[in-house]
Image: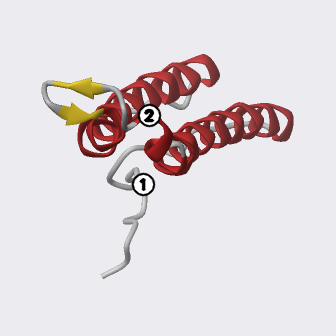
C-alpha cells in the first residue's frame, strides 16, 4: 500500500512554504532567543552561585541568602524563563507564519 494514494492529499499538517530569506530571518530571531535564554540560564546556574558565600551573611526566613538563591531563586528563574521562552517563540512563529494550529 503506497503512503500517498493517487488523487488524495497526504495525511497530517502540510509543511509551511517558506522562502530562503524568510527562513534565515526566522532562524536569526530563533537562535537569538535561544542564546538569550542560555545566557540567563548560565547566570542563574553559575554566576549567582559563585557569589553565594559572599551574600550568606544576609538571612531570609532564617536561611542564608546564598542557600535561598540555590534552593528557590534559581528554580523560579528557570520556570519563569521556560514560560517566557515558549511565549516568545510562539510570537516569532506567528510573525513568520509557521505557528502550530
Residue 1: percent from left, percent from top: 30, 82
- The residue positioned 44% from the left and 34% from the top of the image is 55
Could you tell me which quadrant the C terminus lies in?
A: top left
Q: Where is residue 76, by image quadrant?
A: top left
Numbered tag placed on residue 55 in the rendering? 2
Side of 98 where 17 appears, left or right: right
Is any atom of residue 101 visible in this view? Answer: no
Q: In the displayed structure, would residue 82 be above or below residue 45?
A: above
Label 2's element?
helix
Is any atom of residue 31 visible in this view? Answer: yes
Instruction: Identify the residue at the far right of this view.
Output: 21
Residue to which mark 1 is pinned = 7
Numbered tag placed on residue 83 in the rendering? none
Mark 1 / mark 2, whichever is N-terminal: 1
- The residue positioned 51% from the left and 29% from the top of the image is 89
- Front residue of 12 and 88: 88
Side of 18 where 85 appears, left or right: left
- Badge 2 density bin: few <14, some 14–19, many ≥20, Cα 10 Å: some
Label 1's element?
loop
Residue 56: percent from left, percent from top: 37, 38
- Front residue of 66 and 20: 66
Contact (Cβ within 8 Å) of mark 1 with mark 2:
no
- The residue positioned 42% from the left and 54% from the top of the image is 7
Residue 43: percent from left, percent from top: 56, 41
Question: Which coloring applies here?
Answer: secondary structure
CA separation in Å, label 1 and label 2: 69 Å
- Front residue of 1 and 65: 65
Instruction: Identify the residue at the far bottom of this view.
Output: 1
Amino acid at each position: 500500500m503506497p503512503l500517498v494514494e493517487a488523487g488524495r492529499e497526504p495525511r497530517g499538517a502540510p509543511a509551511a512554504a517558506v522562502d530562503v530569506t524568510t527562513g534565515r530571518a526566522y532562524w536569526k530571531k530563533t537562535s537569538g532567543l535561544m542564546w538569550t535564554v542560555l545566557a540567563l540560564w548560565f547566570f542563574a546556574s553559575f554566576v549567582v552561585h559563585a557569589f553565594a558565600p559572599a551574600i550568606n551573611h544576609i538571612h531570609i526566613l532564617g536561611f542564608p541568602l546564598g542557600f535561598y538563591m540555590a534552593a528557590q531563586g534559581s528554580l523560579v528563574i528557570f520556570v519563569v524563563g521556560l514560560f517566557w521562552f515558549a511565549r516568545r517563540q510562539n510570537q516569532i512563529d506567528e510573525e513568520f507564519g509557521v505557528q502550530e494550529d
